[in-house]
Image (cartoon, rainbow, N blue to C red):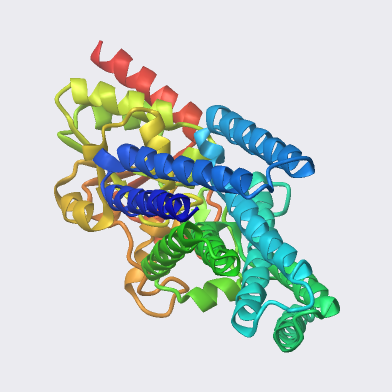
Amino acid sequence: MRSFETALHLVYLAAATCFVLGLHMMNSPASARRGNLLSAGGMAAAVLAALVAVVRHGAGTGVGAVVLVAGLAVGGLGGLYAARSVQMTAMPQLVSLFNAVGGGAAALLAINDALHAGSHGLGRSIAVAVGLDVIIGSVTFTGSLVAAGKLQGIVPGKPIVFPGSRVVNAVLVATFLTGAGLLVADQSNRLALAMLALAALAFGVTMVLPIGGADMPVVISLLNAFTGTAVAMAGFVIGNTVLIIAGALVGASGGILTKLMADAMNRSIMNIIVGGFGTGDGGPATVVAGGVQVREVAVDDVAIQLAYASKVIIVPGYGLAAAQAQHEVAELAQLLERRGIEVSYGIHPVAGRMPGHMNVLLAEANVPYPLLKEMEEINPEFGRTDVALVVGANDVTNPAARRSGTAISGMPILDVDHAKSVIVIKRSMGHGYAGIDNELYTAPNTGMFFADAKAGLAGLTAAVKTLVG
């Protein structure tokens, strides 16, 4: 028996090592795929070891066996189907659903442990872990579902604020904290457990509803950190080392990423959670910004500039993802490269709807990793660039961030306006999350090419081919 427990802990230790090494390998796009596979292998080993332990302890028989097999079948087949069928443009929604599943599972595990604690109770320290697990897991579950709904269009992407919403949130927080306190004081108090869980579930909804769709990258990252923390708490509840380690890694890395992304927007995490900013996904088509006429260009004008440029930087944004135009932009870039033109991509940390959204999207179109340049690396290059091609990006290119008194003052941006010529592909003059005009659009070196990104890029590719024969 002791030798089995030793072997089990060694497998868990090996799995945890795989998690750490895999996470480290994800620092670089070149090794990220191997890191993901290594982490997945570690998780597979941990799950298998846990199943063996369950069977050995006699819990994997009868109804328990049916539940285990059903869970493995549904989860495994569901995950396989999602991985093989989801479009890269829908990856943020899938990540949100994964966050919801992880947080919900962790909360259910803690609730189950509390309900079956027996007359001896949980113990004060475990009761604290149960309370934290239920709070964080429940908030993550409903909050992630709302985030996925906003990204999918099921829930309006704009901030949804109702009168008294702040008061409602304060009441919900007080309710689940009170429930947690009562549970710690009396671990058999099922009413406190129910009060705690229901209030946390409701708070997850009311917390995410006021947040605009453009802030979803930060929200998804924050909810991912919540998921990891909930899983770590679940590890404490059931005494599972690998859950503690895996959850702590996800929680810590997600928290760091959330802070970095909030800094990239020059906003505090609390400011984002409070919400109230719009999404910029809509807005009527017009050629006027702030009363100033913008310069509209035709497909042939843009094709000539691209075909005879020496250096082109492509700046993708959510408009590229919404139009599913990653293959079209890659085809245009390859055409220009065959003409000897230097092409690269400028990636802003919060472009898109989740961390790394643009990187994942362009990777699907087989854009070479070395061409994807982070903001700090690409900004010095704009000054010697002939054409900066902005595809659906808004606030991350707005020069208004460089002066005080605007909604995005101090926010680091991509210096596209330093290029000799700027071409913006956009369906309309709709605002970004800050709700202000993009001063880039009225700059003398900017031409507005009003089109859906997919159709516009395909038209540009055809026009360049015609132009150069």
The C terminus sits in image quarter:
top left
Front in this rendered view, residue 443 or 394 = 394
| x and y, in percent, of residue 4 in the image | 46, 50
Q: In this view, does 416 lie above or below 85?
A: below
Q: Is residue 119 above or below residue 239?
A: below
Please state if 228 lies on the left or on the right of 412 as rendered: right
Q: Which residue is drawn at 19% across and 20% down?
A: 338
Q: Which residue is drawn at 75% across and 80% down?
A: 172
Front in this rendered view, residue 361 or 174 = 174
Determine the image quadrant of residue 394: bottom left
Q: In this view, does 319 lie above or below 179?
A: above
| x and y, in percent, of residue 45 in the image | 45, 42
Q: Residue at x 39, y 58 (%)?
A: 396
Front in this rendered view, residue 369 or 95 = 95
Residue ranking furthest to the top: 469
Q: Residue at x 28, y 53 (%)?
A: 24
Residue ranking furthest to the right: 191
Please state if 119 lies on the left or on the right of 364 as rendered: right
Tag count in the figure? 0
Determine the image quadrant of residue 160: bottom right
| x and y, in percent, of residue 192 in the image | 80, 80
Front in this rendered view, residue 154 or 45 = 45
| x and y, in percent, of residue 116 in the image | 77, 66
Q: Is residue 433 visible?
A: no
Q: Can residue 69 be seen in this view?
A: yes
